[in-house]
Image (spheres, helix red, strand yellow):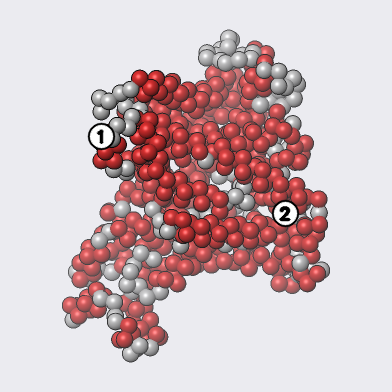
Amino acid sequence: MRKTDNARHAKLPAPGKQSKQSFGIRLGKDLKRNYGAYLLFLPVALYYILFAYKPMYGILVAFKDFTPAKGVWESPWTSSYGFGHFISFFKSFYFGRVLKNTLVISFSTLLVTFPAPIMLALLLNEVRSTKFKRTVQTLSYMPHFISLVVICSMLRLFVADSGIVTGFLEKLGIVDGTYSLLSMENFFVPIYVFSGLWQTVGWNAIIYMSALSGIDQGLYEAARIDGAGKLKQMWHVTLPGLMPTIIMLLILRIGQIMSIGHEKIILLYNEEIYSTADVISSFVYRKGLLEYNWGFSTAVGLFNSVINFMLVLMANQISRKTIYMGLW
Amino acid sequence: MRYKSKGYTVFTVFNYIFLSLVGFACLYPLYYVVIASFSDPVKLISHDGMLLLPLKEFTLDGYRMVFSNRLVMSGYRNTLIVLFVGLCFYMVLTVMGAYVISLRKLMLRKPFTILIIVTMYFNGGMIPTYLNVSDLGMIDSLWSLIIPGAITTSNLLIMRSAFMAVPESLSEAAEIDGAGHRQILLQVMLPLVKATLAVMVLYYGVAHWNAWFNASIYLRSANKFPLQLVLRNILIEGLNNDMLTDVGSADNPQAVQLLKYSLIVVSTLPIMCIYPLLQKFFEKGVMLGAVKG
């Protein structure tokens, strides 16, 4: 009895056989046999339905003049067949500003923080002393473990009118040191980007380090025999060996180009520098949770999500065409 | 390996110097905060340039202010409660979900997997999520920090890969011996994926230790705030002056600054001491995440 039961699991039923029993009957049997597994999944499914799918239904708010008293369903649709919030966003002066800031911050971050870990990994790879390598690595991970709130507080202290960074720039004659750098529009992007570099460079180098350790040592030997020096080996063996990882991560990053998290932005910005610091997500936060403009805020967020999703789809397509590997 | 050109030697020297600088640059801001927290705040403000040792007079006033503050202490307590209760919760749910969608022979495995993966690409967004939590009556309750974010889907997928890497013959053997799914999961699978479990605990732990945003929108009463939100209110919003009046210097900017540096040290030092010990697990975690789900 047990034996036959087991044999049935081990082999998938052949396609021809499948049609013999109806889907319902097979499902019934599976439920009976694996009821333990289905029971285990029940709370997980409940969690996803309640906390991931139910909020998706709430997206309807984007098309409504929502008031909490009436609820999502009863609230009236907005003007323009429900697209009123979208139209007023596109027409508003904020649209251009948050779009520009999102793109500027995103591309600057990509430009600075993407190549840096690759270079760090390449340089660390040339270090012979394991002890030195470990020390540098450990130090470079450190910022990754500091909470965002603390990082932003440190930044604010360093760039305050009496802060160490401001003092340094004052000596160079760039600023006069009477204001915090965060009250000046021009400094927000560099502060955001370079602190991001500090936070991520060591941590992001890990994945390249492990890709490096996967490169066939025989290739180096062959290169040496062909007379390539260390630097040439780095250029002709190491870098090509890293390429698949680099391309993969780059494509992933491009898929996220329009999504900048709101947390770091709202910890750093203030009214004086909205013109360069306010991005889509921080705008959504302010409109919705501080000004209770629920419908409008949800509409802006939805607009952002749709673009993000299209970018991910595009990135996936590019990835499939270039490195024959996709996200799904 | 003996092959060395002159150019390479020069490169090596510069490489060591450069990497030392990188290490220093990563460490120095933290070191500066520690030094500043012991320094005479008046001198600190007028001092510019690098600091390598505390400026005299050496002071512990900052720490006195921090430890006499009720909110910082209750913040620590709340964070630990959320972390502990939450971790049990997250781990149980993540393991259960991951185990079920790792079962190759389960008929509904595919729909279940899709149900989960879809949420990585679509979500309600900020406002609908907030309205949902509010509908469920969790506003101003610590549960709002635990339940809504209980499962991180990417973590669940890492866990699933770990289960799928266990040879199927093991669970089949257990099944022949009459074990049910609960027994297979607890007695066969879990002991084999201990390393991944450790990574999960660390990932969830770090994420929830650092979290402040949800607390800032869901919680109302200050005595429920977790540590990071208390830090944000004091360090960034400059709220809560009752902490300063304890020392009798409510509107003294130097004291405020000293307090901020000390607070950063108090809140960050525990993590800085633990992480080098756990570094290996974190590195492992990065590689697990890199394996496609």
Q: Secondary structure at mark 1?
A: helix
At x 64% / y 13%, what residue is drawn?
A: B47
Residue located beneath label 2 in the image: A288
Which structural element holds mark 2? helix
- Looking at the rendered structure, which numbered label has been put on residue B230? none
Task: Tell me which corner region of the image, top left, top right, bottom left or bottom right, holds residue B130.
Answer: bottom right
| Residue sitting nearer the eye, A244 or B173 | A244
Position of B190 with respect to B134 (left or right) is left
Tell me residue A257's x, y (percent).
60, 50
For badge 2, the amino acid type reads Gly
- Classify residue B124 by image quadrant: bottom right
**Circle 1 is placed at which residue position?**
A225
Rendered-image quadrant of the N terminus of chain B? top left
Q: Is residue B1 left or right of residue A113?
A: left
What residue is at 73 percent from the left and 67 percent from the top? A63
**Disc 2 from disc 1: Cα separation:** 65 Å
Considering every residue shown, the one lying at the far front of the view is: A226
State the image coordinates of residue B65 (x, y, percent, origin top left): 61, 25
* Residue drawn at 64 percent across, 42 percent down: A105
The reply to whether label 2 and label 1 mark residues of one chain is: yes
Residue under the image location 72 percent in, 27 percent down: A180
